[in-house]
């Protein structure tokens, strides 16, 4: 990856530049990307990945991949594998630096004992409900737990018995002894360990007590000698606790820096909500091309470089805001415009018979593969008596501004000839099923010798040579800009756009697409960018996904 992709200097990079100048951490830069393996990564994670790996790249540091797997209930190896695949696909490499918070369970446990010994932690018998009550609210002081002053011996004994499985879930917890009247709720004796008789995807049944996120995260950072622990803004209030634990233990102190998370219009982003979409079969899976997941975007045909450039462009700030989905799509289009070969495809075919073209005859027409890239060369497309055109490109009774096919009109077939519609054939229901046309063989170069102008240019494929395909046309999953902003009593999932997926089962493609490889992207002339589906497509039965329309259509409405 080139440094220019991530060149912009944001406030995080400014802090790091100063730290290096001041020889803090001996000038080293070690960041980490710490996903919880409880779902697939989404475009918000991509922002964090690009930031953390990008910084390591820019400052000749390293970035660790650490699975923050402290919550055994929701975590799974499937997620671990998908996360690795997605980070790699985005173009980043953690080398040997793959870690799991669960690798530190032993050390974190020993540190908990040290905290107890130093009178900085105690075993509490209050229920979750009671803890909440004792904590009180933002504007009200909390109350000390009646178990707060247990002796070190008693705490050590109870903690050992918690670990040995003597108590039921929720019966006891280990809490840090900080300050029940702190204005920062996170410092009101936060939980360090909770009892969970749960199988863990890596440590199996070894533990029935699990450390909380706050009691694990900073200590894991410290163990890995992270220099800059970059997280999203909602952790700003946790920083005093992060610092408190590190100071209490007297260990290497990474600096926590917060930035604003990415929010996109028309998109829900929380993993909990994405899981709901998957489990409720609102989408076909985590990698459904409508999902804002990295795997969904990959399947949809988004190039990794487009996602990286988008992330570099939006940068990082301290203010939460909403980014327009159209901006991401712009980066996708700009990239594909340069790299995707052009092809002709008809999504909703209407048959054309050219009455003055001999039956059984055909000829090859030349077509430019990519006007943006001469090296992509040219290809040949068969032309014959029967063609398919897009049903949309014909109107029997066209309004003034319709410049395509209509009775009596002449249009230009892209890379073909001028074609004139003489007759319209309908079925018993009055549906147009065929156009009878004539072509002008003198217009092979795209111009008529007499200088006459056709009303427009349309695309086509030769019926006899066309290959069949299914084309899945995707639209936004949520039409509302703020996707999950629904009135009370309304389930946000019920607002899913019913046209978020439109399947075109009878698409007809030019024959050069017969052996298009899974994942390959094309610009279907006049229609948009499409890629071969990486799951459901096979040589004999092609499936294409619409990656993006040719331009942002929103303003047209
Ligand atoms: P979600 O809220 O979507 O469930 P999360 O924060 O719980 O996500 P983690 O697996 O804990 O997910 O996130 C890993 C890293 O990615 C964290 O450092 C987190 O701050 C960052 N991250 C998550 N969502 C976003 C986002 N929308 N924008 C930027 N960074 C994000
Ligand atoms: Mg999280």
Image (cartoon, rainbow, N blue to C red):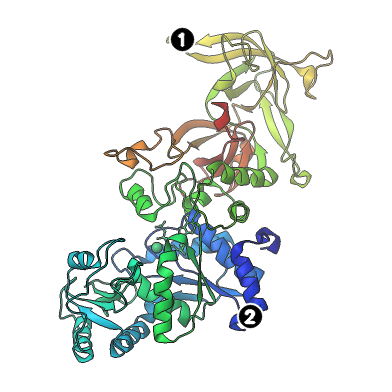
Nearer to us: label 1 or label 2: 2
Residue 515 in view, yes or no: no
Identify the mark at residue 141; answer none if there is no mark. none
- Calculate the distance from the C-alpha at mark 1 to the C-alpha at mark 2: 77 Å
Q: Quadrant of residue 80?
A: bottom left
Quadrant (top left, top right, bottom left, bottom right) of the N terminus: bottom right
Q: Quadrant of ligand 2?
A: bottom left
Indicate left or right for 325 with 444 as reference: left
Any atom of ligand 1 within 8 Å of the CB at mark 1?
A: no
Name the residue located 62 percent from the left edge and 61 percent from the top edge: 10
Q: Is residue 226 above or below residue 300?
A: below
Identify the residue position indicated by label 1 in the image. 430
Name the residue located 47 percent from the left edge and 46 percent from the top edge: 289
- Rate crowding at label 1 as few (under 14), some (14 to 19) or many (20 or more) other CA atoms within 10 Å: few
Near-viewer residue (554 or 472): 554
- Rate crowding at label 2 as few (under 14), some (14 to 19) or many (20 or more) other CA atoms within 10 Å: some
Considering only order in the chain, which callout, 2 or 1, is on the residue closer to the N terminus? 2
Q: Is residue 32 above or below residue 318?
A: below
Q: Is residue 554 above or below residue 424?
A: below
| Residue 164 horizontal/vertical position (percent) | 20, 84
| Residue 513 horizontal/vertical position (percent) | 61, 40
Identify the residue position indicated by label 2 in the image. 27
């Amino acid at each position: 990856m080139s440094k220019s992709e991530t060149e912009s200097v944001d406030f995080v990079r400014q802090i790091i530049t100063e730290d290096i100048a001041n020889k803090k951490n001996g000038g080293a830069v070690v960041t980490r990307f710490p996903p919880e393996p409880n779902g697939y990564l989404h475009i918000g994670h991509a922002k964090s990945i690009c930031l953390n790996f990008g910084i390591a790249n820019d400052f000749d540091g390293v970035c660790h991949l650490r699975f923050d797997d402290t919550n055994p209930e929701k975590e799974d190896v499937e997620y671990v594998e998908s996360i690795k695949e997605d980070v790699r696909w985005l173009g980043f490499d953690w080398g040997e630096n793959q870690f799991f918070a669960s690798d530190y369970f032993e050390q974190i446990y020993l540190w908990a004992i040290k905290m107890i010994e130093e009178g900085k932690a105690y075993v509490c018998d209050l229920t979750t409900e009671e803890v909440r009550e004792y904590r009180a609210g933002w504007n009200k002081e909390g109350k000390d737990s009646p178990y707060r002053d247990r002796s070190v011996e008693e705490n050590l004994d109870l903690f050992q018995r918690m670990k040995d499985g003597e108590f039921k879930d929720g019966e006891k917890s280990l809490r840090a002894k900080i300050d029940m009247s702190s204005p920062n709720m996170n410092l009101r004796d936060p939980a360090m360990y909770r009892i969970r008789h749960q199988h863990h995807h890596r440590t199996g049944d070894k533990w029935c007590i699990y450390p909380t996120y706050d009691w694990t995260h900073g200590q894991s950072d410290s163990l890995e000698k992270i220099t800059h622990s970059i997280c999203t803004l909602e952790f700003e209030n946790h920083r005093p606790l992060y610092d408190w634990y590190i100071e209490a233990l007297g260990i290497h102190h990474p600096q926590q820096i917060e930035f604003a998370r990415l929010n996109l219009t028309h998109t829900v982003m929380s993993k909990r909500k994405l899981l709901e979409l998957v489990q409720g079969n609102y989408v076909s899976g985590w990698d459904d091309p409508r999902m804002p997941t990295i795997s969904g975007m990959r399947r949809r045909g988004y190039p990794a470089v487009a996602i990286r450039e988008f992330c570099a462009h939006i940068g990082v700030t301290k203010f939460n805001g909403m980014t327009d989905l159209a901006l991401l799509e712009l980066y996708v289009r700009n990239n594909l415009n340069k790299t995707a070969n052009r092809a002709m495809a008809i999504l909703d075919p209407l048959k054309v018979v050219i009455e003055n073209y001999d039956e059984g005859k055909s000829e090859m027409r030349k077509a430019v593969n990519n006007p943006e890239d001469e090296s992509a060369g040219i290809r040949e497309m068969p032309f014959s008596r029967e063609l398919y055109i897009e049903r949309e490109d014909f109107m029997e009774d066209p309004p003034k501004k319709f410049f395509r096919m209509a009775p009596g009109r002449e249009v230009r077939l892209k890379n073909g000839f001028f074609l004139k519609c003489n007759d319209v054939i309908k079925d018993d229901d009055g549906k147009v099923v065929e156009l009878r046309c004539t072509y002008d063989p003198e217009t092979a170069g795209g111009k008529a010798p007499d200088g006459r102008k056709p009303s427009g240019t349309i695309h086509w494929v030769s019926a006899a040579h066309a290959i069949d395909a299914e084309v899945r046309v995707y639209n936004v999953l949520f039409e509302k800009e703020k996707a999950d902003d629904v009135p009370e009593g309304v389930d946000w999932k019920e607002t899913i756009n019913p046209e978020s997926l439109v399947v075109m089962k009878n698409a007809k493609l030019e024959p050069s697409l017969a052996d298009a490889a899974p994942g390959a992207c094309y610009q279907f002339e006049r229609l948009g960018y499409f890629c071969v589906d990486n799951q459901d497509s096979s040589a004999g039965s092609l499936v294409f996904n619409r990656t993006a329309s040719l331009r942002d259509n929103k303003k047209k409405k």
